[in-house]
Amino acid sequence: MIEPDRILRLEADRVVLLDQRRLPDVEVEVECFSAQDVADAIQAMVVRGAPAIGIAAAYGYALAAARGEDLATADRVLRASRPTAVNLSCALDEMREDPSFERARILHEDEVARCRRMAEHAVALIRPGTRALTHCNAGGLATGGYGSAVGALVAAHERNLLEHVWVDETRPLLQGARLTAWELEAAGVAHAVIADSAAASLMAAGAVDCVMTGADRIAANGDSANKIGTYGLAVLAHHHSIPFYVVAPTSTVDLATATGVAIPIEERAPAEITSRFRARNPAFDVTPAALIAAIVTEAGVHRAPFADSLAAEVAPA
Ligand code: MRU
């Protein structure tokens, strides 16, 4: 497991982030000296993944408080840095009462602890010899340590339940091919990177037993936003009668958003796809709850209908 402090940490006068844009080729850090620096790094995806950007925002806010920055401005720029992951606003809400370094570091520790508990629940869904497919990166890099969906897959590997992981490359920024493959390699998990478009034929060939992904925001009814392409995988999994699982902490559940229709979807720069032609670059899509076999949080395994069990577990904001 990548040490949480190596992924991101708060030092006396700076927030230090492992630059995920450069992985796996180079391991370099980016230093942020203000809330604006942290917001810029989140926007540029130096740090990415819903829980990790929440932790980065908490660190940025604590740093802003220590520097005597205007906290309303710090909150505004951090909150606006990426719109889809609810963890960002959730973390900033938690920091408002006590913007101390200690509080921010506890928030980081809590996220990693949630991941470990999620993995314990998620392995119960994985049968011996499973060949899983995952999309984007829901590993330690995305959560500040351990990982949600990838953490669960590593835990399944450690219990000899997992045969193999198909890793969607995850166009256009290749979080799967660069980050998930790197993490699985480090954990000794058998895996192969595939083009996103290969998932359908692998499923048709009977080579996929389950799909497991993270989420950026889970609406009150269970509709789940995640990296663009996740919805397509869920449709494919449904067609092939393969269970589709979402593994995410309660900090990703947004009871104030009734259904997926109301989840804001980030639209990123077309240049991430092509600089030659016009392009559209929606960064996330929403998987309807009806396509999700289970949502796993640190509290347990939720089955449809999700609304009551999610509401019972998540305190209203
Ligand atoms: O654009 P990204 O790389 O931040 O997107 C990340 C994802 O879609 C992850 O699957 C999600 O944040 C869950 S991370 C545990």
Image: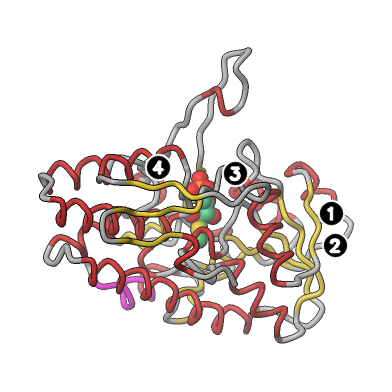
Which residue is at the front of the view, 35 or 85? Answer: 35
- The residue indicated by pointer 3 is 22
Q: Earlier in the sequence, mark 2 or mark 4?
A: 4
What residue is at 38 percent from the left and 62 percent from the top?
9
Which residue is at the front of the view, 242 or 10? Answer: 10
C-alpha distance separating marks 1 and 3:
30 Å
Amino acid type at circle 1 is Leu
What residue is at 35 percent from the left and 42 percent from the top?
83
In the depicted structure, whether residue 162 falls above or below residue 291? below
Tell me the quarter of the picture where residue 80 sits. Answer: top left
- The residue indicated by pointer 4 is 41
Secondary structure mostly seen in magenta is: helix
What segment carries the magenta color? 309-315
Which residue is at the front of the view, 228 or 13? Answer: 13
Q: Earlier in the sequence, mark 2 or mark 1?
A: 1
Q: Nearer the viewer, mark 1 or mark 3?
A: 3
- The residue indicated by pointer 1 is 202
Task: Check contact, mark 2 vs mark 1: CB within 8 A.
Answer: yes
Amino acid type at circle 4 is Ala
User: Tell me, what colour scheme is on the image?
Assistant: secondary structure
Task: Check contact, mark 1 vs mark 3: CB within 8 A.
Answer: no
Give the percent coordinates (x, y) of residue 56.
35, 55
Q: Quadrant of the N terminus?
A: bottom right
Amino acid type at circle 3 is Arg
What residue is at 36 percent from the left and 38 percent from the top?
40
C-alpha distance separating marks 4 and 3:
13 Å
Q: Earlier in the sequence, mark 3 or mark 2?
A: 3
Amino acid type at circle 2 is Ala
